[in-house]
Structures are given as C-alpha cells and as structure tokens.
Image (tube, helix red, strand yellow):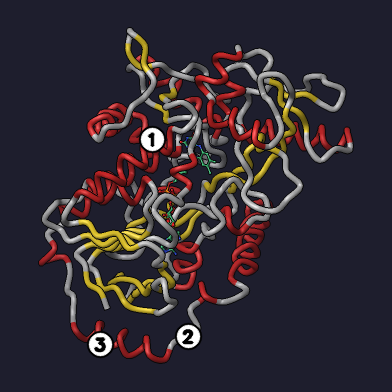
Amino acid sequence: MKKADILIIGTGVAGLFCALNLPVEKNILIITKDICEHSDSFLAQGGICVLKDDSDYDSYFEDTMRAGHYENRKESVDIMIKSSPEIIRDLVNFGVSFEKNEDGFLYTREGAHSTPRILFHKDVTGKEITSKLLSAAKQRNNITICEHNAMVDLIVENNRCFGAVARDENGVLYNIFAPYVIIATGGVGGLYVHSTNYRHLTGDALGVCMEHNIRLENIDYVQIHPTTLYASTRGRRFLISESVRGEGAILLNKDGERFTDELQPRDVVTAAIREQMKKDGTPHVWLSLRNIEEEEIKKHFPNIYKHCLEQGYDVTRENIPVVPAQHYFMGGVWVDSNSKTSCENLYAVGEASCNGVHGKNRLASNSLLESLVFAKRAAKHISEIKTKTDFEFNDEIENKYEQLLKTRTDYFLLRDDYVAVMRNEIEKAKEKHNNE
Ligand SMILES: Cc1cc2nc3c(=O)[nH]c(=O)nc-3n(C[C@H](O)[C@H](O)[C@H](O)COP(=O)(O)OP(=O)(O)OC[C@H]3O[C@@H](n4cnc5c(N)ncnc54)[C@H](O)[C@@H]3O)c2cc1C
C-alpha cells in the first residue's frame, strides 16, 4: 500500500506540468506504465501554438473552431488561447528553448492555420519540452515518480475517488490511497493497428471510468494523421509532421501529380489521400519536399531527415511514401474548465481528458498547449480547495480495499479482451453519433 496527498497517473506533459504547478508542501506520487521517456509527449514534432499578439485572437479562435467542425466548447478554446503566452513563459522558465532569430521567436505554420503561430524546437519540440519538465520534476523533493507501475483501477466510493489500484513492475497489485487523483494517461493509439502513438497507450482511463460510470465524452472522435511514413511491417508509425507541408511539401499521386490542397484540416486531407489511394490502387501516396531548400530541411527537420534516410529515403532528393494512421484522441474523460471529472476529487488532463477544446477534429499543434493549460488549471483548482473541510478520508475504506486486493483478479484492464472491448465501445459511440 502507498499513500500520497496527490496521485498523478502518467508522466507526459500533462502529468508532469500538473505536478510542477501543485504546492511544494504536497506529497505527490506519479506512476507511469512504462519509462518516463516513453510518452507521446516526447514524440511531438511540429510545435506548440501561441497567441502571438492580441490581433491574432479572432483568427486563432476561428481556425480552432473551423478545424473542430464548430463542435468545440467555446469557453475552453477561449481559455486555451488566452492562457498560451503565460504557458510559453512558464516553459521558457523551465529552460525550454524555442527557435529564434534576432527579432525574437520564429513561428512555423501547419495545416488549417491562417498564419504562422507555432513555436518549435527543430522537429523535436515535444522532447525539448517534456525532457525539461521531467528534469524539473525529478529535482523536486515532494515528487516521487514510479516507472513501470500501471493503474489498473480507480478506488471510487459513492462517486468520490480515494486513490487507485496499481500493478508494479513484478506484476504485484497494490493500493494507492490519495485524497486527489489526476488521470494523465494520454491517448488510445495502442488500440489501433496503425498509429503514431506508443503501443502501451490503450485508453486505460476510458476503460476504468466507464466501469465506474464516470462521464466520458465523444470517445469516437479519433484523429487520423494524413502523413505517416508508409511501412509494410507492424508497429508504431513514424510521423511526417504537418509543418513539413506547412513549409511547402506537396502530396502527389502515383503519376506524380498534386491532387489536393495540403494545408486543409487533417480530416479533409486524410479523406483526399484515401480517395486517391483507392483511385490509384496503391497502399500509399507520395510526399515531395522539393519546394523546401535542402539546408532548411536539414535544419528544421533533422529528425525526419535522419529517420527517412535510415529507412532508405533521402527526402532532399526523392519523394517518400506516406499513408494516414491513427494519431490523436479528441474525446476522453469529460472534464469541466478546471479539469474536474464527474467524480469527486478526480481530475483528468491531457489527451485522456475531453474539455472540448478540439471539438470533432484537432487543429495542428494545439494539443501540447491544451494539455499544459488545463493541467495547470487542475493544479490551481486542487491547490485552492481547503482539504480538511472538503474531504473525509477514512480507515474503513482503506481496510475494505486492502481486503479486496487479496481476492480480486477481475480488473477490467487486465482482461485479455480489453482492447477488443474498447474498440467496440468506440464503434458504438460512432454509430450513435451517426444516428443523431
Ligand atoms: C508522433 C506524434 C507527434 C505529435 N506532434 C505534436 C505536435 O507537434 N504538437 C502538438 O501540440 N501535439 C503533438 N502531438 C500530440 C501530443 O504529443 C500529445 O497529445 C500530448 O503530448 C499528450 O500528452 P499527455 O501528457 O496527455 O499524454 P502522453 O504524453 O501520451 O503521456 C501519457 C502517460 O500516461 C502513462 N500511462 C498510460 N496508461 C497508464 C496507466 N494505466 N497507468 C500508468 N500510467 C499510464 C504513459 O506511460 C505516459 O507516461 C503528437 C503526437 C504524436 C504521437
């Protein structure tokens, strides 16, 4: 058994930033299913959006809404955009470095943005941000991180969360009791055969919340990224960032002809590619970087350049085969604008949560920002609660769950058919949406 003032599940940007914004006198335990470096946050390539100046507000708001098919929660979009300069200042204070020139920050552009407003660090922005946050968290005496410890259930009584059941690196189950629990378990890519996500991200929070009747929202809103490097083998797909198209790369059919506007929202470009593949009878289309200077490719996209070279493609000279793959999850555990779920004392942040920012389809480079903004809000909300009056923590519950642990083996997440059940739930949600 473990105890903490606050339990955070997941060490991506959302979990780490939340921990770093909680009071230093709180004893914070973070558990993570794999090693800390294996989160999608480390994989983010393109960058992070920011409101450059007030004159861009309307345009940024409209781009986010348009990409989301106007199904976004407007309040959340407003909060995210207005909080963005503060979040970037926070990141810079944690040592994060973004590309600059003599006039200040450099901004890149991605699909469906009407102007360049994305800060970046080469093509490894996620690694730059997450590694700095991780190192700051490791330096805090009040934060303990346990790798290879996975949440398999939440401890919920009368719609109030008291902690979680976890499995340690030896497969042993144990209870963690904490007055506040924050879900930061990321997306659902591991449920899909072709995905850019880490395989261990299997929507665990969704499964657990579903079991406890904790509200979920839009679990069928799954984003497919138009351009991942085609491979005939199984495993995680390598992303070719949208900012490559933002900087001028074009999509070509089997005859080397352009067939769509590459800078439309992701779902539109994905549909165009799929249609073209069908017409051509090919398992992929082609991406050409010929409009981008060789020097710029190597400077702005060194990771993509290197990876493609290792796979036998020199992007400075030849086209590369690309295909759509699962990439991001807009739905999730329903939360309010303070990231609080429908269950007392339980919060959800990052890709696991749904605060409605993205609507039906995420605008490129809004997810790191959204994760950070709403993780900070969760931390602030918890910090402002008067623990004593708000919460009764009792031995009775501890004893009950310690006893239960000795007999229970039927945790939903540990079942062999977990992935199939979750896929089925997502399909059911899609069908429901289609019939509305
Ligand atoms: C290839 C790629 C490129 C991307 N590029 C961009 C970009 O340029 N800009 C942008 O804004 N966004 C980008 N994204 C999206 C963005 O990276 C993610 O949405 C964001 O990082 C999610 O952060 P998170 O903290 O919610 O989840 P993650 O970073 O995925 O972290 C989830 C954490 O939860 C842990 N976990 C999962 N289940 C359990 C469990 N049961 N018990 C314990 N721990 C668990 C995992 O081990 C992990 O530590 C990209 C994503 C990918 C995959």
Quarter of the image where one finds residue 243: top right
Residue 333 percent location from the top left of the image: 44, 57
Callouts 2 and 3 close, C-beta under 8 Å? no
Identify the amino acid type marked 3: Asn
Determine whether the residue tagged by mark 2 lies in a helix, strand or loop.
loop
Query: Residue under circle 3?
Result: 399
Mark in front: 2 vs 1: 1
Q: Which residue is labeled 2 in the image? A: 409
Q: Is residue 251 above or below residue 235?
A: above
Question: Within 10 angstroms of label 2, few (less than 14), some, or many (20 or more) residues?
Answer: few
Q: Dot 3: what SS?
A: helix
Residue 288 located left or right of residue 418: right
Position of 321 with respect to 346 (left or right) is right
* Label 1: element kind: helix
Cβ of mark 1 under 8 Å from ligand 1: the answer is no
At 48% from the left and 19% from the top, the residue drawn is 108
Q: What whole-number distance in Å separates the C-alpha atoms at marks 3 and 1?
A: 43 Å
Q: Work out whether residue 212 can be spotted.
A: yes
- Residue drawn 58% across and 71% down? 418
Q: Which mark is residue 405?
A: none
Q: Residue 26's quadrant in the figure?
A: bottom left
Kind of residue indicated by mark 1: Glu
Marking on residue 128: 1
Quarter of the view holding residue 184: bottom left
In the image, is 149 to the left or to the right of 281? left
Q: Earlier in the sequence, mark 2 or mark 1?
A: 1
Instruction: Please identify, in this view, whether the residue under mark 2 or under mark 3 is nearer the observer.
Output: 2
Label 2 vs label 1: CA separation? 40 Å
Q: Position of residue 116 (x, y in %)?
A: 47, 17
Who comes first in sequence, dot 2 or dot 3?
A: 3
